[in-house]
Amino acid sequence: MHKGTTLSVKPHSRLMHWYRWQPYRLPLFNTTARMAMSINFSLGQFLTNGKLEDQKTKDFFQNKQVFFGLSTIRSGSTFLADLLESEITNGQIEHEPNVNDYWSYAKVLKSNQHADNYINTYRKKDMVKRCTKKETAIYGELNPFLVLHAAAIKKAIPTAKLFHLVRDGRDVVRSIMAREVLGNKDPMLKVITPPVDDPYFEQWFSMSRFERVCWKWQYENKVLRTAITQRIHFEKMITNYDYFKKELLDFLRIEISKKHWSTYSKQPKHASPQHNMLKWDNWAKTQKEQFEKICGAEMKANGY
């Protein structure tokens, strides 16, 4: 579980963190969780009445510096959110703030139009309500569950700064495999499939979990690479302050000292406590071949 100094962990995340590491599977947990997410999602849409932004929302985005750091999961978003939340005194930084983003993620896989509707009629208002700190000049989100909404965010909030946080796919896949994402304990397992025009759509249900996790990494990073020009490599960000300053701090126009950056970099948050896979160079020949087939082109496109 995340042990950052200031970043709070949402109740739904706490529940999944707990369940993930249990040796058993609870009957009906996935079904109940999906039902709860679906109801919560519908309720959120109903309460906003599907209306476009009001003047308060417009003023919010005109008067604040807004940014989004988007990435696939296990790519350093928790670490970065904790660092920024701790060091930015005049801003509010959120990490995976809204459980409805999980449900919306699955819907975007079925329809790109959903992303535009979700951001414009619901999520922008949610950001305004979420910004509770007084004298807040900055609003930022580090959110792996809005990766498929990147283009919609750019259109809906043209003044916002977006950056693509990317990590070596081999490390990400290994880290995800230590969790239940796209596994039997994942409530979203039955609702996440590739888009119908994706090369892997037809074979999805015959693919192994490992292959599906590989697909997730390459698909999400391709979406982000296509939509966002500012790309930040996680490995460089935590080992090279000059890179961190140039690519992130200068881009966002914020300041964090090398001393404080160093403290956080040496004590990474939310690291996997255990792995059920060896490091990639010790993977089985079949796994290496599957990873290269699915992720090879995207790895090269992202500089790996």
Image (cartoon, grey):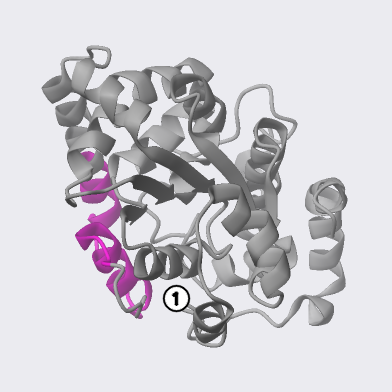
Q: Position of residue 229 (x, y in %)?
A: 71, 38
At horizontal 26% and vertical 16% (from top left) the residue drawn is 53
Give the main secondary structure, helix, strand or loop, of the magenta stretch: helix
Q: Nearer the viewer, residue 257 or 288?
A: 257
- State left or right for residue 34 relative to residue 278: left
Quadrant assignment for the N terminus: bottom left
**Which element type, helix, strand or loop, lies under badge 1?**
loop
* Magenta residue span: 8-36
What residue sits right under mark 1 in the picture?
Answer: 270
At horizontal 60% and vertical 27% (from top left) the residue drawn is 195
Quadrant assignment for the C terminus: bottom right
Task: Classify mark 1: residues with Cα within 10 Å, few (<14), some (14-19) or many (20+).
Answer: some
Residue 268's place in the image compared with 227, above or below, is: below
Residue 117's place in the image compared with 109, above or below, is: above
Q: Give the number of callouts.
A: 1
Residue 131 sits in quarter: top left
At horizontal 57% and vertical 83% (from top left) the residue drawn is 262
Q: Position of residue 197 (x, y in %)?
A: 68, 22
Q: Nearer the viewer, residue 172 or 211?
A: 172
